[in-house]
Image: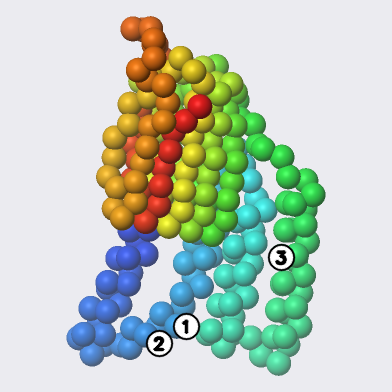
């Protein structure tokens, strides 16, 4: 199961619940959302830290720190020392972002499965697996580049891709057969590989199950 899809569905379910409670005169949905919306950022960052393989910590850390800082303001959790705490927090964000810029390399994975989840940012992952089985890729308000050109496929390899308000690019080597299916919702997906140009009958097959919501998924060489 693509955890990005779970996060996105959970977000909309929470919004639906709040507006239902407002209709029942239980609470003011606007006030609750105005106070607690940064928890969505914190949850997205925590989920990225929990599931990303290969492990990447900079982007999720920035997302969680920013979410916590904004939450402290929207809910009134900080006191007179608030400005100092906020300045320290943003200094930490700046240091993390600088470490990501100057130390940026494309993470290389030798694992047989790749699980990537990015929100409000971008990520690049390359797999050198010799028995690549597939995995999950999720992008919300961000983008993902998955490079499989140095990987070798296992039988029945499948990637589950979920993209909302962003984009996902998957690069595959020549000689693979790509079978793509999915659901575009105000978005689209494209198989730009050379499936019809002299592939062997026993060519390795990669299945891509794509959901594109106001976004795009593309598989290419």
> Which is nearer the eye, 97 or 54?
97
Marks 1 and 3, Cα distance to the nearest angstrom? 22 Å
Label 1 neighbourhood size at 10 Å, few (<14), some (14-19), many (20+)?
some
Residue linked to disc 2: 31
Residue linked to disc 3: 93
Marks 1 and 3: which is nearer the front? 3
Residue 2 in sight from this viewpoint = no
User: Position of 38 compared to 85: left or right?
Assistant: left
Query: Tag on residue 193?
Result: none
Report x, y in % for residue 19. 27, 79
Label 3 neighbourhood size at 10 Å, few (<14), some (14-19), many (20+)?
many
Q: Residue at x 35, y 61 (%)?
A: 10
Report x, y in % for residue 98. 77, 57
User: Position of 159 compared to 108: left or right?
Assistant: left
Q: Residue at x 46, y 14 (%)?
A: 175
Report x, y in % for residue 167. 46, 48
Marks 2 and 3, Cα distance to the nearest angstrom? 28 Å
Q: Residue at x 37, y 20 (%)?
A: 195
Query: Tag on residue 35?
Result: 1
Please, what secondary structure does the residue beneath circle 3 have?
helix
As drawn, 46 above or below 14: above
User: Position of 174 compared to 197: left or right?
Assistant: right
Label 2 neighbourhood size at 10 Å, few (<14), some (14-19), many (20+)?
few
As drawn, 202 above or below 100: above
Q: Quadrant of residue 22?
A: bottom left
Of label 2 and label 3, which has the lower sequence position? 2
Residue 84 in sight from this viewpoint = yes
Marks 2 and 1, Cα distance to the nearest angstrom? 6 Å
User: In the rendered structure, are the residues bearing label 2 and label 1 in contact, judged by CB atoms less than 8 Å apart?
Assistant: yes
As drawn, 61 above or below 203: below
């Amino acid at each position: 199961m693509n955890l990005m899809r779970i996060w996105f569905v959970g977000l909309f379910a929470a919004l639906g619940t709040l507006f239902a409670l407002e209709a029942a005169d239980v609470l003011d949905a606007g006030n609750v959302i105005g106070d607690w919306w940064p928890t969505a950022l914190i949850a997205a960052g925590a989920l990225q830290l929990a599931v990303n393989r290969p492990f990447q910590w900079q982007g999720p850390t920035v997302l969680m720190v920013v979410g916590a800082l904004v939450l402290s303001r929207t809910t009134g959790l900080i006191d007179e020392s608030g400005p100092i705490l906020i300045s320290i927090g943003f200094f930490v964000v700046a240091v993390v972002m600088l470490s990501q810029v100057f130390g940026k390399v494309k993470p290389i994975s030798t694992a047989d499965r790749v699980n990537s989840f990015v929100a409000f940012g971008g990520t690049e992952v390359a797999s050198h697996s010799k028995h690549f089985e597939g995995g999950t890729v999720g992008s919300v308000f961000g983008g993902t580049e998955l490079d499989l050109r140095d990987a070798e496929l296992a039988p029945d390899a499948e990637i589950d891709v979920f993209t909302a308000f962003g984009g996902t690019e998957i690069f595959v080597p020549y000689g693979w057969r790509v079978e793509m299916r999915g659901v575009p919702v105000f978005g689209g997906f494209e198989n730009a590989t050379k499936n019809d140009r002299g592939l062997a009958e026993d060519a390795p097959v990669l299945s891509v199950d794509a959901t594109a919501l106001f976004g795009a998924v593309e598989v290419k060489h």
